[in-house]
């Protein structure tokens, strides 16, 4: 294997804002806000600022599952953060997530607002708050948190590693694609072996671990991210495939996937969500038809 564009790193790395990558417009080597803008505040206790990427969808699935269970306190306003336009660098967003990445949430149900960032932390916070989708016995809880943290540590190899080099990088680099394809296939095998023996990730019950893992690995095996289903031979992970289809069929999952979505079919885009009736009346096809 050889790389025709072999690169010799300079002594000190310098920021080349025009590096040609898909996200060059917004990627920066520095943190902090780029502009002043306060975030809107809606009527509900929970305020979500997000986008329907896999990390964003984890949270909207949990919120819709909680509402489906009858937890009225999980009512939420969801505002769109357009990461392609740099909304994640507004002063208001940086106040609730100094890491400038979606999803971020504010819980205004108590005397003082509480900010929560990192999708795994938001799932854990909400599961504890509503005492749902997280086992309470020590062994079950340990298993669930282990898989939740497995997802948080593993998905960057899938998204930032495999997805980036297979789908987004300006050139196809064999070394990088091989390295990350190998790791993603190993991760899929980890899941497949687990799901060969269990209905859901942690056992008989559907938990926040399923909600964290499905938007990445469940969606990957259905072939809808990175168009890599054939390349990774995803159909060979048959237990993951069975589990992924089972979760995709849940009504709350279907709703959760639509929230803060600004791409794909217009009827599946609910860019902002303020009420459960919005799924019937405020999808983008209806908004554009009314204009
Ligand atoms: N570990 C974080 C990752 C969040 C993340 O990477 N979000 C991406 C979208 S999926 C983002 O906001 N990217 C914008 C940017 O990098 O500027 C989490 O799970 O919440």
Image (cartoon, helix red, strand yellow):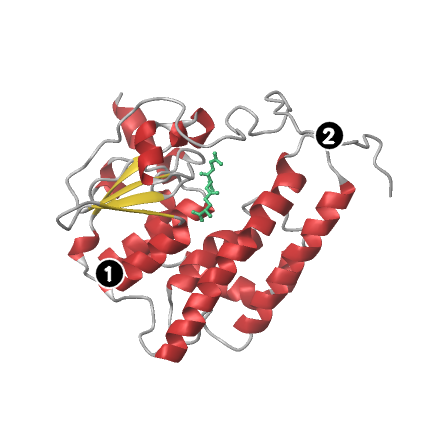
Q: Which numbered disc, 1 or 2, marks the residue closer to the eye?
A: 2
Return the x and y of residue 168 as percentages of the image width and height: 62, 35
- Sequence order check: which comes first, mark 1 or mark 2? 2
User: Residue 269's quadrant in the figure?
Assistant: top left
Q: In the orientation shown, which residue stands out farthest toward the front?
A: 11
Return the x and y of residue 242 as percentages of the image width and height: 52, 66
- The answer to whether residue 219 shows anywhere in this view is yes
Task: Specify few, some or many for label 2: CA neighbours under 10 Å numbering under 14, 14-19, or 20 or more.
Answer: few
Task: Specify few, some or many for label 1: CA neighbours under 10 Å numbering under 14, 14-19, or 20 or more.
Answer: few
Q: CA distance from mark 1 to mark 2?
A: 50 Å
- The answer to whether residue 227 shows anywhere in this view is no
Say if mark 1 contacts mark 2, CB within 8 Å. no
Q: Residue at x 56, y 74 (%)?
A: 196
Return the x and y of residue 182 as percentages of the image width and height: 70, 56
Name the side, left or right, on which 126 lies relative to 27: left
For the C terminus, the quadrant is top left
Q: Is residue 76 above or below residue 183?
A: above
Name the side, left or right, on which 56 lies relative to 177: left
Q: Which numbered dot is residue 270?
A: none
Q: In the orientation shown, which residue stands out farthest toward the right?
A: 1
Q: Residue at x 19, y 59 (%)?
A: 71
Dot 2 falls on a residue whose secondary structure is loop
For mark 2, what is the residue? 11
Return the x and y of residue 78 as percentages of the image width and height: 28, 40
Q: Is residue 103 above or below residue 94?
A: below
Q: Which numbered dot is residue 129?
A: 1
194 or 266, nearer to the observer: 194
Q: Is residue 259 above or below residue 21?
A: below
Q: Is residue 270 above or below residue 253?
A: above
């Amino acid at each position: 294997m050889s790389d025709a564009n072999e690169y010799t790193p300079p002594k000190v790395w310098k920021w080349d804002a025009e590096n040609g990558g898909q996200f060059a417009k917004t990627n920066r080597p520095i943190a902090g806000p780029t502009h002043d803008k306060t975030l809107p505040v809606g009527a509900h206790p929970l305020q979500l600022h997000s986008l329907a990427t896999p990390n964003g969808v984890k949270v909207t699935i949990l919120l819709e599952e909680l509402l489906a269970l009858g937890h009225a306190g999980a009512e939420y306003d969801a505002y769109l953060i357009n990461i392609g336009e740099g909304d994640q660098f507004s002063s208001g967003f940086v106040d609730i997530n100094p890491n400038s990445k979606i999803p971020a949430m504010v819980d205004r149900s108590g005397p003082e607002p509480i900010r929560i960032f990192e999708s795994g932390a938001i799932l854990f916070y909400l599961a504890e708050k509503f005492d749902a989708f997280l086992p309470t016995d020590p062994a079950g809880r340990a298993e669930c948190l282990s898989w939740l943290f497995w997802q948080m540590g593993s998905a960057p190899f899938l998204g930032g590693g495999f997805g980036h080099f297979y789908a987004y990088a300006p050139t196809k680099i064999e070394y990088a694609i091989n390295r990350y394809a190998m790791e993603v296939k190993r991760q899929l095998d980890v899941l497949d072996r687990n799901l060969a023996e269990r209905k859901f990730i942690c056992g008989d019950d559907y938990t926040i671990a399923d909600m964290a893992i499905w938007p990445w690995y469940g969606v990957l095996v259905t072939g809808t991210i990175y168009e890599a289903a054939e390349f990774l031979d995803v159909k060979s992970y048959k237990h993951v495939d069975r589990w992924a289809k089972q979760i995709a069929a849940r009504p709350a999952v279907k709703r959760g996937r639509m929230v803060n979505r600004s791409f794909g079919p217009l009827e599946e885009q609910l860019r902002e969500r303020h009420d459960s009736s919005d799924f019937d009346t405020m999808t983008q096809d209806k908004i554009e038809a009314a204009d």
